[in-house]
Image (cartoon, rainbow, N blue to C red):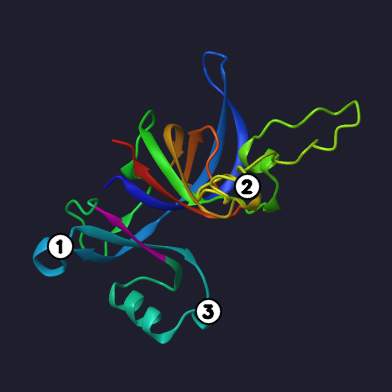
Amino acid sequence: MAAILAKKLGMTQLFMEDGKVERVTVLEAGPCPVTGVRTHERDGYEAVQLAFWATKEKHLSKPELGHLKKAGAPPLRLVKEFRDEAGELVVGETVTVDAFEVGQVVKVSGVSKGKGFQGTIKRHNFVSGPKSHGSHNVRAPGSIGASATPSRVFKGIRGPGQMGNKRVTQKGLTIVRIDAKDNLMLVRGSVPGPRNGYVEVRGDA
């Protein structure tokens, strides 16, 4: 099993034995009880369903509580499916950080930080206009289409708008350290999302 749900605790630095400094993100990964297993014969696809993030019963609906109780799991806020990751898992088992190992390459998916309505310079890295000699086009996007032909703006033109707050997958992250006692996983580099946000960790085959 090479998939688990985790909470992003933040970033720090780690001094390795050779004196090298690693910039790492600390993830609280699992434990995640298996609440469902999908098979080709019954469901048409293979997947495993994991639950994570302890909460109070009053924050869940009766169907959600019944589904978790059937799997022998406590009240948990998140329930996610991972395609083609079932392996030999059965309902009632628990996935922990022990399913991963130091040096393994993983990919982490999450919802990026929302930055609201932004202009083209911040949103798409456009180059700003001249800042001297009376220029009035300092942070404007510039021309976005001809007036006569085609007399319209083509679809897909990059412009200002909502930035962030969308699903992002960061690939090629290496696990630097695993602390099975405290369910911690330290990966090299940054991962999507805010502090205390949840992410999905998968093996990056």
Name of the residue lying farthest toward the bottom: 62
Position of residue 10 measured from the top left corner of the image (x, y, whole percent): 61, 44
**Label 2: which residue?**
159
Residue 94 vs residue 149, the one in the foreground: 149
Are circles 1 and 3 on residues that touch, CB within 8 Å? Answer: no
Q: Position of residue 78 (x, y in %)?
A: 44, 65
Return the residue at label 1. 39
Q: Which residues are magenta?
A: 79-83
Question: Nearer the viewer's eye, disc 2 or disc 1?
Answer: 2
Q: Main secondary structure of the magenta part?
A: strand
Q: Position of residue 140 (x, y in %)?
A: 75, 41
- Amino acid type, mark 2: Gly
Which mark, residue 59?
3
Q: Residue furthest left?
A: 41
Q: Earlier in the sequence, mark 3 or mark 2?
A: 3
Residue 164 drawn above or below residue 121 = below
- Work out whether residue 180 can be spotted: no
How far is disc 2 from disc 1 in space, using C-alphas?
Answer: 44 Å
